Image (cartoon, rainbow, N blue to C red):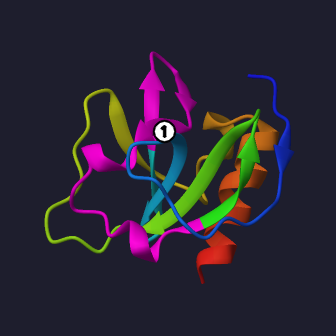
């Protein structure tokens, strides 16, 4: 994946916008899995009704696509086909170096 990331801020999040979502649950992040590779989750927020997008943080743009970060505090763990929860700290080998940096930055901004 070619990585061109720009930090910026946007206040309103359209629920039907196709965007990269960095969804964290404790120390894990929800990622799209494609065989042995992991990719950022590119979805519309409306397909995950348990997320309160009012609490999401716009963190920038990745290859001209908006990026948002949020903690999942829902009672039921989010389940989306072809995704898995991956521990961020112990998964540096699962992501490219650039994506690991973006995931880490998104997590820091949420604190």
Location of residue 101 in the rendering, given as x and y in whole percent from the top left corner: 78, 53
- Residue reaching furthest to the top: 35
Residue 61 screen position, x and y as percent? 74, 47
Name the residue at 62% across, 68% down.
Answer: 107
Question: On the rendered structure, is 96 left or right of 55?
Answer: right
Q: Quick one: label 1, few (<14), some, or many (20+) residues within 10 Å?
A: many
Quadrant (top left/top right/bottom left/bottom right) for the N terminus: top right
- Measuring from the top left, give residue 59's x and y in whole percent: 69, 62
Q: Give the image location of residue 71, x and y in percent.
A: 43, 70
Residue sitting at x 22%, y 70%:
74
Q: Residue at x 56, y 31 (%)?
A: 39
Identify the residue position indicated by label 1 in the image.
41
Q: Is residue 90 left or right of residue 79?
A: right
33 within the magenta span: yes
**Which of the 4 quarters of the picture holds residue 65?**
top right
Q: Which residues are magenta?
A: 31-57
61 part of magenta stretch: no
Q: Is residue 15 left or right of residue 90?
A: left
Image height check: is 76 above or below 75?
A: above
Quadrant occupied by the C terminus: bottom right
- Quick one: 91 or 14, which is closer to the camera? 14
Query: Please, which residue is most extreme toward the left here?
Result: 76
Quick one: SS at disc 1?
Answer: strand
> Closest to the observer: 81 or 44?
44
């Amino acid at each position: 994946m070619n990585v061109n990331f720009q930090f910026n801020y946007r206040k309103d999040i359209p629920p039907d916008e196709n965007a990269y979502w960095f969804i964290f649950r404790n120390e894990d992040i929800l990622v799209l899995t494609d065989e042995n590779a992991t990719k950022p989750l590119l979805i519309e927020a409306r397909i995950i009704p348990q997320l309160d997008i009012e609490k999401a943080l716009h963190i920038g743009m990745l290859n001209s696509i908006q990026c948002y970060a949020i903690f999942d505090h829902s009672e039921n763990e989010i389940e989306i086909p072809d995704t898995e929860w991956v521990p961020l700290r112990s998964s540096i080998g699962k992501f490219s170096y650039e994506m690991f940096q973006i995931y880490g930055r998104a997590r820091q901004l949420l604190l």
